[in-house]
Amino acid sequence: MTTQTDIDRIAAETRVIAVVGLSPKPERPSFGVARFLQARGHRIVPVNPGRAGGQILGETVHASLSDIPDRDAVDMIDIFRQEMPLRQRLEDQELGDRQRHRLALPGAGVALRVHHQ
């Protein structure tokens, strides 16, 4: 069970957040959340295969989690995708060994937001 102490610790320790499914459209929830996270001092790393190589909120967009360079050291993954099992979405991202290792760490965090259209 997650306690408020756990939530406070995660919030204090999380610096870099990969946002899977980040939309460049300001009206989308993913954009609003990413902008809020930036305003709170977090660095976001956009992941959107349709926008790879471009920029969203001043950050370079990556096609998949495995394309994020090691130097970005992602602390948390925030997922905005249409409804589908999380395991399939993560497999679709072609996680490399580095990312799988990060997800397996006790302190690693994944926040999932299911988007219904």
Image (cartoon, rainbow, N blue to C red):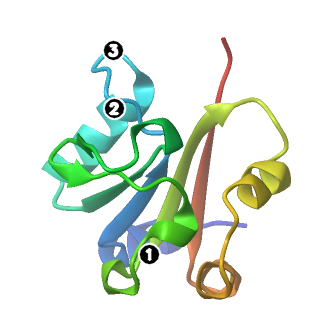
Quadrant of res 51: top left
Disc with the residue nearer the chain's start (1 vs 3): 3
Q: Residue beneath label 3, please?
A: 27
Q: Residue beneath label 2, please?
A: 31
Q: Where is residue 60 in the image (x, y as percent from the top left)?
A: 26, 54
Q: Residue visible at 48% across and 36% down? A: 50
Q: Is residue 4 visible?
A: no
Q: Residue visible at 66% across and 11% down? A: 117
Q: Residue beneath label 1, please?
A: 75
Q: Residues within 10 Å of mark 3 (few under 14, many from 20)?
A: few
Q: What's the amino acid at mark 3?
A: Glu
Q: What's the amino acid at mark 2?
A: Phe
Q: Residue visible at 56% across and 70% down? A: 66
CB within 8 Å, label 2 to label 3 = yes
Q: Distance between the residues labelled 1 and 3?
A: 26 Å
Q: Residues within 10 Å of mark 2 (few under 14, many from 20)?
A: many
Q: Distance between the residues labelled 2 and 3?
A: 7 Å
Compared to residue 7, the image places residue 102 above or below, namely below
